[in-house]
Image (cartoon, rainbow, N blue to C red):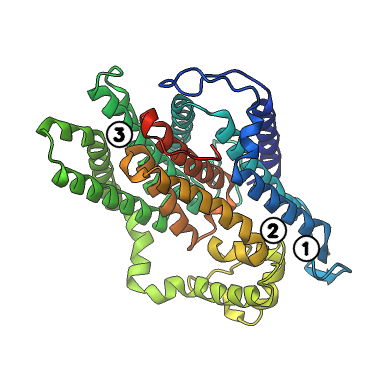
Amino acid sequence: MQPWAQLTSLGISAIGFLLVALPRAEEADSSAAPAFVQWPAARLLRFPVFWAGLLLLCYVAVQGLNPAWRFVSNSSSWWLEPVPHVPWLPSGVRGPFGRSNPWRVLTVFGSVWLLVCSVWAGFLRRQSYRSFFTLIVANAFLVAVLGVLEQLIATKRIYWTYLPSNGNFVASFIYRNHAGPYFNLIVSLATGLAWWHFQRERRHLESPGRSVAFVFLGALVGVMVLFSYSRMSIVMLLAFIAVVSAILTIRLLRHKGPGPDRAEYLPAAVALAALVGVSLSVLRTDKVWNRFAGAVADPAASIHDRALVRQASIEMLRDRWQLGWGAGSFRYGFPIYAQRYPEIYDSALGRRMYWEHAHDDLLEFPIELGLAGLIPVAAMLGYFAWQLVLQRFWRNGFSLCAVLGCVLVLVHAGLDFVFQNPAVLFTWAVMLAGAARWAELDQPLGRRAVVPAA
């Protein structure tokens, strides 16, 4: 969430993109005859997400170059001053980079665009995706271990060094509702990898043990979802368990082959059983129960604040729905509408509230980008959805778990600003793209659907 981290991420993504663009010779797939690729960059020119993402970045850049307002502040307050601009072009707010502005958002959007394009064009084999996702799960496992240690020692600093503005941090996440969705994505990755490895172990394609390792990793990361005390994240974790359990049950009931073949569902079942057991234990603790008790006792009060924010945000969207307010500009324009609801700053819990986000990404992105800016976003999501359906992802255990995790986090984004955290956004985008490619590469060569852009 810090500017230096986002700039570093942009630099690393750019280096990866440049490496992918270099000519190289690589085998297209381990199950296919060697197919040497001279210019991987040519794959990008046939990748619709490359062009749609580039269009989105240009759109945000125009918002930054054509500000309609200027952020001004003194020692006690801040306000917006109108500045001359081209009214028929997308516009934004000329604010400080360290606070938020279109250029800050362009840094994040540029990083995720470069990352997805690099993965799509650079990884031509299923093994590359497997190694990549294994690395992501291993990294999250280390973060979760440090998060558990923070919980046990009750430290006031992130990794015992950085003092955050929010005392309810989780591992390296300042905001608990960012940690929960990130770890939920990792749980779905670990479950999918465990399922896939066990299928290979049963066919004697690899030595036993890897599926059990991913079951263990997924269970521990799932513990961190619970210890985030994020109510919606816990609900989404339980929803993931319930949906995957239902899918496993249906597949077992419909299975007509020999009994032993049903064992292919064992790792996913063990992972889900472990998560259920840990969930029931943690959910009985006072801190978790207290998080849910208030919402259960008085549901109206628990959603009162965000209901007002959503109402004011809808009015904000209605005034500039065509071209938006400008990427990263929600926090600047929202007070104009919030003043119509004075109680919006008085929490039902007795705290003074300060709203920098709509706590609804599915509303905040349209407010900032407008209908015109959402067109390339919809094109990218539509392309991946088409790819997943084309490859019948529901028949592939890994892709099914990955897509389910992405869908549940998308649902969560309708109730909080989870995609404002680059760690969540990057992981979500790479998982969605990777699930589509995995579903394609995991099929026998003769059964693969032909995808022109791939």
Verify CB contact (< 8 Å) between mark 2 and mark 1. Answer: yes
Residue 433 is left or right of residue 449, and the answer is: right
Viewer-nearest residue: 9 or 401: 401
Q: Mark 3 or 1 closer to N-term?
A: 1
Q: Secondary structure at mark 3?
A: helix
Q: Mark 2, residues whose alpha carbon is within 10 Å: few (<14), some, or many (≥20)?
A: many
The amino acid sitting under disc 1 is Val
Viewer-nearest residue: 295 or 163: 295
Viewer-nearest residue: 198 or 342: 198
Q: Mark 2 or 1 closer to N-term?
A: 1
Whole-number angstrom distance, CA of label 2 to CA of label 1: 8 Å
Q: Secondary structure at mark 1?
A: strand
* In the rendered image, the vertical position of residue 428 relative to residue 70, given as above or below: above
* In the rendered image, the vertical position of residue 140 relative to residue 400, given as above or below: above
Q: Which mark is residue 328?
A: 2
The amino acid sitting under disc 2 is Gly
Q: Which mark is residue 93?
A: 1
